[in-house]
Amino acid sequence: MRRQIQWLLDQLFPAKCAVCGGTAPAGICPECLDKLPRTPEEICPHCGRGKDKCFCSHMRGECFHRLAAPCYYTAGMRTGICALKFQGVKAHAGWIGELMAETVKKRFLNEGATIDLMVPAPLSEKRLRERGFNQSLLLARRMAQLLPSSILLDDTILVKGRDTASQHDLNYEQRRENLHGVFRADKRAAGKTILLVDDVATTGTTLSECGRALYLAGAERVLCCTAAVAASVKGEDRL
């Protein structure tokens, strides 16, 4: 019965492409998928950008080992992420999560990395109540369906202890100060290689502060995968 109801809903309200608005059962049409702003084959393994856009010289002791993302945060990928995050179109977590899973396989697993746990970047309790969902968890759930079953998804090992101001208009140093010490991880992280999942890496500050908490809890290594990474940073003082 549930499948029949879903089929009827799909016929009455067909899924729209996140980018062009055309009919797209997968949430994005093939044409727009092909046009997404993909990161190049050769990337900086730490900041996740193409080497011509590497920003590592501006980073200061980030607490993660590597970062990879399938796309830059522009054009169609930005539209899809914003629809998921701010408009609550959760279906977009499906195709975006698929791209992220492909990236993890290509950039990490196929290069010999062993991953024990997949951990989504957490929201504060206040932000979670306001939004109603954690977009990073939705992405991680889709990724878990496509990655080896030995990689366990754990959305309780890392928490954000208090709400913070929006990072959007802050520079690099302000972002670090804003998030310093707000994340906590428990000892289940000890000795584990952890895949940290988030939607966008702009300055890398959120990933770094999450990584710091995981390393303080004893994590062996923190690898990061985001749906997108900023192609450039306003003022070139934040990554």
Image (tube, rainbow, N blue to C red):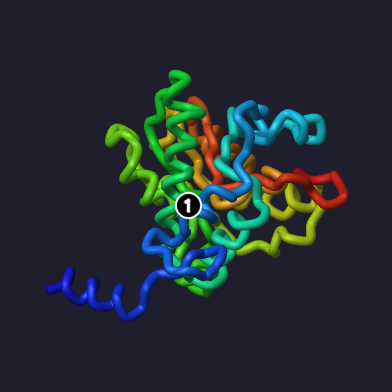
Residue visible at 37% across and 31% down? 116
| x and y, in percent, of residue 236 in the image | 85, 45
* Left or right: 102 in relation to 146: right
In the depicted structure, whether residue 79 falls above or below residue 156: below
**Residue closest to the far bottom:** 12
Q: Which quadrant: the N terminus?
A: bottom left
**Helix or strand or loop: what does disc 1 sit on?**
helix
Report the front residue among 121 and 190: 121
* Left or right: 233 in relation to 92: right
| x and y, in percent, of residue 207 in the image | 61, 43
| x and y, in percent, of residue 23 in the image | 43, 68
Residue 98 appears in view: yes
Q: Residue tagged by mark 1?
A: 96
Residue visible at 28% across and 36% down? 149
Please state the total of marks drawn on the protein image.
1
Q: Amino acid at mark 1?
A: Ile
Few, some or many C-alpha atoms within 10 Å of disc 1 (few <14, some 14-19, many ≥20)? many
In the depicted structure, whether residue 93 falls above or below residue 12: above
**Residue closest to the far front:** 31
In the depicted structure, whether residue 108 falls above or below residue 133: above
Report the front residue among 116 and 9: 9
Report the front residue among 3 and 209: 3
| x and y, in percent, of residue 145 in the image | 31, 45
* Left or right: 145 in relation to 18: left
Q: Which quadrant: the C terminus?
A: top right
Residue visible at 55% across and 57% down? 161
Report the front residue among 199 and 183: 199
Asked where in the image residue 42 lies, by quadrant, the reply is top right
Residue 191 appears in view: no
Residue visible at 20% across and 76% down? 5
In the depicted structure, whether residue 4 falls above or below residue 159: below
